Amino acid sequence: MADSMLGGQLTSGFGAGSRRESTALEGYRWLKQHIGTIPRDVGVIISEADVIEGAGIGRTPAREALQRLEVEGHLQIIPRKGIYIAPISDAEVKYLIDSRRAVERWSGEEVAVRKLFDDGVLARLIEQQESVVADAGSFIESDRAFHEAIVTAAGNPILSTFYEQLRDRQVRLGLTAILHESGRTSAVLAEHRAIAGAIRGGDVSATHAAINQHLDSTLSALHWRP
């Protein structure tokens, strides 16, 4: 009987802990998505109550989500003032683009040389992005999917994990770029087609050049100042 009761208590406890972790993860994902919609040159202050209401979770999981995001560097919890989501500085913009350039050039080369894509994969991703051109958020998510597909196909799980860690800042940068520069969405689609064409042709030099052009024009659209 004692063993049965103990087993029941343990099961119940683990269940409660699992539910709390799941709820905290919901809050974490909601807040990361919210941060991704804030242009990179804007700093905002939100409250714990905003997270509770927006994510539809309780105070404890909201705090756990906030603490996790603070550790990851996405925000700063300021006692008695709120949660500060800082702009992305010019220096950080350059670091992010440099990181992308290193990963995407290597990945593009691997995919081009080893012919790791069926002909239509990147074309379909570009078509998907073109279909949501009127929705800034969906357009940037599709943009991210295009680049992520290339990195994933290259087959280096360490680089893929690193690239995923850049995701939320990349979304903020992408949103800012298309809001700052008229015609940026058309330019992005053209640049993606150039990358896809170079990869499809197995041309490493053209692949590197197309990726460089795309990232350089992103820096320009972000009004980055060296």
Image: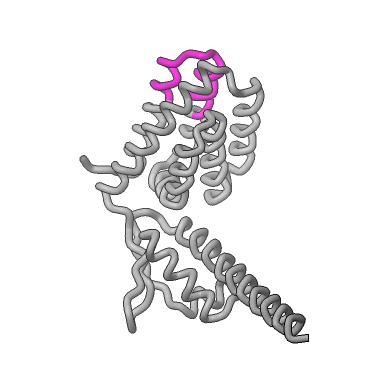
Is 193 within the magenta? yes
Q: Where is residue 150 in the image (x, y as percent from the top left)?
A: 53, 31
Is residue 27 positioned above or below 208 on the image? below
Residue at image position (47%, 25%) is 108
Question: Could you tell whether 76 is left or right of 187 in the image?
Answer: left
**Which residue occupies the foreground of this view, 126 or 99?**
99
> What's drawn in magenta, residue-wise?
192-210
Is residue 173 positioned above or below 73 on the image? above
Q: Position of residue 219 (x, y in %)?
A: 33, 38
Please give the count of numbered marks on the rendered protein: 0
Residue furthest toward the left? 226
Residue furthest toward the front? 2
**Which residue occupies the foreground of this view, 181 or 69?**
69
Question: Could you tell whether 79 is left or right of 37 in the image?
Answer: left
Is 10 within the magenta? no
Residue at image position (42%, 26%) is 106
Residue 71 seen from this side: yes
Q: Where is residue 174 in the image (x, y as percent from the top left)?
A: 44, 45
Q: Position of residue 116 (x, y in %)?
A: 59, 22
